[in-house]
Image: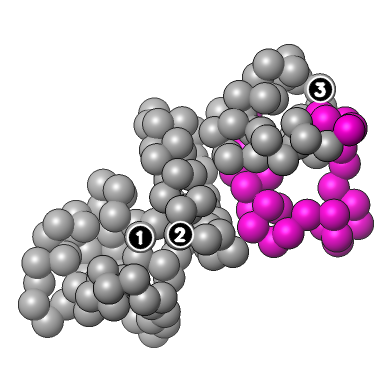
Amino acid sequence: ENLDPLGEHKDDELWSALELAQMKEVIASHPEGLDLEVREGGENFSAGQLQLLSMARATLRQSAVVVLDEATSALDAATEKALLIAMTSAFRERTVITIAHRVASLLSCDKIIVFEEGRIVEEGTPKELSNKPQGIFAAMLKPSEMGQSTQHD
């Protein structure tokens, strides 16, 4: 019910969405399987797992536009990388608007728009912006390349 509240998809479609979202093993290992419900407040899943379940839902919806707001903020780097690779394929025919502070989640985007204090201060491809020596995106990217977390508001 959590993945497909209207019952529009077959079980194999649900399992495919869970696999794309890196949650197939978690759900398959639970005795309730696809019948497992997210409890009130999501107490039976971690914050990262809840984000992954949301991504599985997004793949099932087939919306023309997908908005991802800090969609990987609670994930470890390895899970985030695997998820981003899978989502790039799953969302290839859709417009995806990604709001993120973690630079790694933006590197596969076609275009990046950097906001500062509500204003657009940079825009371009990841390559263009990363090559701007005094650019905000390039500055955000440097600590990320060294394996450090970056946050820029």
Residue tagged 1: 104
Q: Earlier in the sequence, mark 3 or mark 2?
A: 3
Q: Main secondary structure of the magenta part?
A: helix
Tell me what residue is drawn at x 26 percent, y 69 percent: 145
Q: Is residue 84 visible?
A: yes
Q: Residues within 10 Å of mark 3 (few under 14, many from 20)?
A: few
Which is more foreground, mark 1 or mark 3? 1
Look at the image and say whether residue 69 sits in the magenta stretch.
Answer: no
On residue 51, which mark appears? Answer: none
Amino acid type of the residue that numbered disc 3 sits on in the rendered structure: Gly
Q: How much space separates mark 3 and mark 2, taking CA atoms?
A: 33 Å
In the image, residue 147 above or below residue 67: below
- The magenta-colored residue range is 31-60
Measured in 3D between alpha carbons, the distance from the residue under mark 1 to the one under mark 2, in whole angstroms, is: 9 Å
Residue 130 vs 116, above or below: the answer is: above
Q: How is the image coloured?
A: one colour
What separation in Å lies between label 1 and label 3 (alpha carbons)? 34 Å
| SS state under label 1 | helix
Q: Nearer the viewer, mark 1 or mark 2?
A: 2
Please name the amino acid that badge 2 sits on: Ala
Residue at 12% over, 60% down = 128
Indicate the amino acid at tag 1.
Ala
Q: Position of residue 140 (x, y in %)?
A: 28, 76
Q: Which residue is mark 2?
A: 77
Numbered disc 3: secondary structure: loop
Mark carried by residue 7:
3
Label 1: few (<14), some (14–19) or many (≥20) C-alpha neighbours in 10 Å = some
| Callout 1–callout 2 Cβ contact below 8 Å | yes
